[in-house]
Amino acid sequence: MLPRTNHSFFRRLAAGALATALPAIASAQADSAHVDKTFFTRRDAIYSGIALAGTAGITVFDKRIANWTQNSSVQGSQSRHDLVDAATHVNETPLTIAAVATYGIGRLAHSETVTDIGLHASEAMILTDVISETIRGPIGRARPRVSQNDQYNFKFWAGFTEFDHRSFPSLHSASGFAMAAALSGEIHERNASAAKWVSPILYTAALIPGVTRMYLNQHWASDIVSGAFVGALIGHKVVRYAHTHKRSKLDRILMGSSVVPDGRGGMLASITLTP
């Protein structure tokens, strides 16, 4: 077993992932009057740089943390392993299916709110998946289970073809935080006071998929932190951009709305929500 200080560090890792993922969200939500002209802004680039630096710092501890997670006292019994393995199935696939299903239910039930939430959650999940895979492919970082003593084992471009070199960032962590950020943003748009209570629960739950992957020796700690940032940023940006800009033609089609004259020489969106 590692010294107690390492147990303390592992507990701080969860707080570190949240601290890395949330600053941009908290800042943007506090300034509700500000409207970004573009989807990705200079402020986002600054936060991304800070997150990248933080991730690089955590890599120093990656091997130490990975060895601790594989310690017999942490791994425990077979029943514990089976339970964690079951929890790791909460990943991008079921979360994306859930988001798309929510959108479909909203359309069928003619509910603008449910449709809106499902659409933006689906967009966040798909975009997070694409961005994460775009990063993982070229970097080709080896998973700890095949490179336990070398966290800097990179085989560039191998991530596109080899599962064992698709470690950075963690898609499990990214998808969990993308969903948490999207739902948190939607709640904040409708009831800011409720978001103060619900958001911490959502982000805490978002930690679970990533932590289970560390337990199963599939990801380094820095993979989890970087995934958390990517997911939180994309999830937040999708929702905020959608609620601060006019709907595009595609948005209106997906929402089941049409543009009609307002009788005063202008135009307005009519929500029809036809299945």
Image: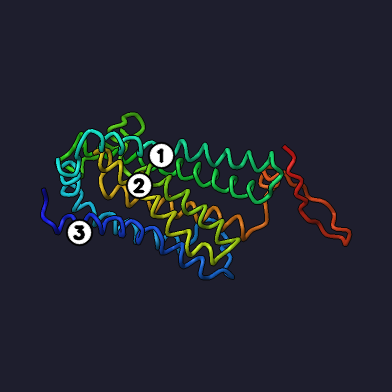
Contact, CB < 8 Å: mark 3 with mark 1?
Answer: no
Q: Could you say which disc has been placed on residue 90 in the image?
A: 1
- Residue sticking out furthest to the top: 161
Q: Is 44 left, or right, of 151 in this rendering? A: right
Vertical comparison of 59 with 80: above or below:
below
Q: Residue at x 21, y 40 (%)?
A: 153
Q: Which residue is mark 2?
A: 208
Q: Quadrant of residue 129?
A: top left
Rendering coords of residue 261 (x, y %): 85, 54
Helix, strand or loop at label 2? It is: helix
Q: Amino acid at mark 2?
A: Ile
The residue type indicated by label 3 comes to Ser
Decide if residue 263 is on the left or right side of residue 127. right
Looking at the figure, which quarter contains the C terminus? top right
Disc 3 crowd rating (10 Å Cα; few below 14, some 14-19, many 20+) is: few
Say whether disc 2 or disc 3 marks the residue closer to the N-terminus. Answer: 3
The answer to whether the residue labelled 2 contacts the one labelled 3, judged by CB atoms less than 8 Å apart, is no
**Place of residue 49 in the rendered image (x, y in percent of width and height, measured from the top left):** 36, 59
- Kindly indicate the quadrant of the structure image that contains residue 79: top left
User: How many angstroms separate mark 1 from mark 2 (CA)?
Assistant: 9 Å
> Which residue lies at the image location 36% right of the left edge and 44% below the top edge?
209
Name the spot of residue 87 as percent of width and height, x first: 36, 39
The earlier-in-sequence mark between 1 and 2 is: 1
Check disc 3 and report the residue beneath it: 8
Which residue type does callout 1 highlight? Val
**Mark 3 element type:** helix
Crowding around mark 2 (Cα neighbors within 10 Å: few <14, some 14 to 19, many 20+) is: some
Q: Residues within 10 Å of mark 1 (few under 14, many from 20)?
A: some
Residue 229 placement, left or right of 267: left
Seen in the picture, residue 174 relative to 163 is either above or below; the reply is below
> Residue 123: percent from the left, percent from the top?
55, 45
